[in-house]
Amino acid sequence: MLLEILVLWSESSWLDLSMKASVLLSEGALEVSAPAGFPDHPHRGFETVTYMLQGAVRHEDFEGHSGTIEAGDLQWMTAGRGIVHSEMPASEGTQKGLQLWINLSSKYKMIEPRYQEMNSRDIAEASKDGVRVRVIAGEALGIKSPIYTRTPTMFLDFTLKPGSQIRQPIPKSWNSFVYVLEGDGVFGTARSSAVSAHHLVLLGSGDGVEAWNRSSKPLRFILVGGEPLGEPVVQYGPFVMNSQEQIDQTIEDYENCANGFEKARHWKSESNVVFGY
């Protein structure tokens, strides 16, 4: 059975699947220009997945890890027990991208931070019958991403030429959504109404989703899915844990630079100095 459309959001809405899915939060399209940005800030208990669409973002953290995420590049950051970092514009004009927050199960929330990073040229791609896909995580059109996901996750970037269609399998137990980046697409069934750019479609139960491009312009969308963890979720700002007690402990750890946040005591990113935060 194909997935059916349950809910449609605009880009101004906040998607919270925290009690249902491993994909905890979708922040939608990130759009920022200097000197605005995301100066030094902490995370604990989940992963951030940054996928740039236009421009570039400079990343630094208190472990000494730094680099630039350019258009088409991917950064999969496991915050684990704690990270403090900054994400700031690295080029002129407006920077655009997507960032997903992916929850970690209780057994992984306090692991050491780590990164998986890929340049655009290294992301797996496949094309067939007018459909091109970039496989950020999971599998599509017979190719797999090398990204390791502790929480089973699918993240696919599809582009459909006019007149083309695709059916993408999704495990029945997963929750998933589509976010349209460009063009207009029909999802779920052939009778569904077209969905335009910057709208999100939450998919219902089933073993796959079908998409059609019936317009005269290319259709580009991302498909994201994840396996439900079945655990309680408590979020406070940049912290995602399983209980209020754990959130309270995390806040205390961060404020006292302890239990994973020790290096925050004497660290400030170069971007903070340059932009005067």
Image (cartoon, grey):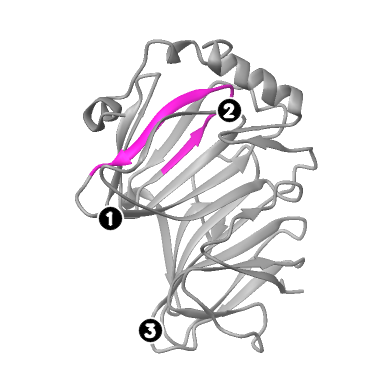
Q: Earlier in the sequence, mark 2 or mark 3?
A: 2
Residue 85 in magenta?
yes
Q: In what element is the residue under mark 1?
A: strand
Q: Earlier in the sequence, mark 1 or mark 2?
A: 2
The residue drawn where x is 75% and y is 42% is: 229
Give how far apart the Cα atoms at labels 1 and 3 are: 24 Å
Q: In what element is the residue under mark 2?
A: loop
Q: Nearer the viewer, residue 154 or 262?
A: 262
Q: Nearer the viewer, residue 105 or 253?
A: 253
**Magenta segment main secondary structure:** strand
Discs 1, 2 touching: Cβ within 8 Å: no
Q: Residues within 10 Å of mark 3 (few under 14, many from 20)?
A: some
Image position of 172 with respect to 180: above or below = above
- Residue holding disc 3: 217
- Residue holding disc 1: 94
Discs 2, 3 touching: Cβ within 8 Å: no
Q: Amino acid at mark 2?
A: Arg
Highlighted magenta segment, given as a residue range: 75-90
The location of residue 213, given as percent across then percent down, is 49, 83
The reply to whether residue 228 is visible in this rendering is yes
